[in-house]
Amino acid sequence: MKKENIMRRPHIVKCVVSIGVGEAGEKLQRGKRVLEMLTDQRPVETISKTTNADLGIRKGQPIGCKVTLRKKKAYDFLKRAFWVKNNAMWEDSFDEYGNLSFGITDYTDFEGMSYNPNIGIFGMDIAIELSRKGERNKYRKNNKKKIPQKHRLTHEEGIEFIEKAFGVEVMYE
């Protein structure tokens, strides 16, 4: 019987939960409050990179907020997020490297959350980065290394990991 190589086992690197409100001010503060209630972490503001006169956005203006979750917090949040999506994902939500992105239209869909008229309705985007151990080598500052193709996570392996780890059913068209 062949032993499993633990270096080839996929894991969640990070989970980024973001809300784009398109403007600074009170609406952005309410979006931050939603993220803080859902993740128990303080969100950071996202800044616009370009000016768009049609949307009334200037370069350098805060237009959204995000939270990065890692390790146990990421797993706990994703269990709740997949429950909101009825433990079902489309195969198109996965990219070629097994990473997953999806959206939730209303924060009140989460278990234990109720509508608050002072906050309003906010949806969010969730992006999950998956990799194997050792892939940190391509991001570090000193002595960067390229990751061989055979060690990179594939689309199918990402789907298999999410199905096993969270009991999510992946639907195909």
Image (spheres, helix red, strand yellow):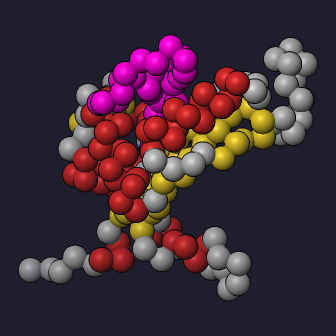
Image quadrant where residue 136 sits: bottom right
Q: Position of residue 57 (x, y in %)?
A: 85, 25
Q: Quadrant of the N terminus?
A: bottom left
Asked if residue 113 is among those painted magenta in the image, a careful observer would answer: yes
Which image quadrant for residue 28? top right
Magenta segment includes 85: no
Side of 14 relative to 164 (left or right): right
Determine whether, in the image, residue 127 is placed left or right of residue 26. Answer: left
Quadrant (top left, top right, bottom left, bottom right) of the C terminus = top left
Q: Is residue 11 above or below residue 75?
A: below
Q: Is residue 73 visible?
A: yes
User: Does 123 sit above or below residue 49?
Assistant: above
| Residue located 29% across and 44% down the image | 79
- The relative height of residue 124 versus residue 136 in the rendered view (above or below) is above
Residue 113 found in image quarter: top left
In the current view of this chain or complex, which residue is farthest to the left?
A: 1
Residue, x 25% and y 53% (percent of image)?
Answer: 165
The residue sitting at the front extreme is 118
Please state which of residues 75 and 115 is positioned toward the viewer in this rendering.
115
Q: Which residues are magenta?
A: 99-126
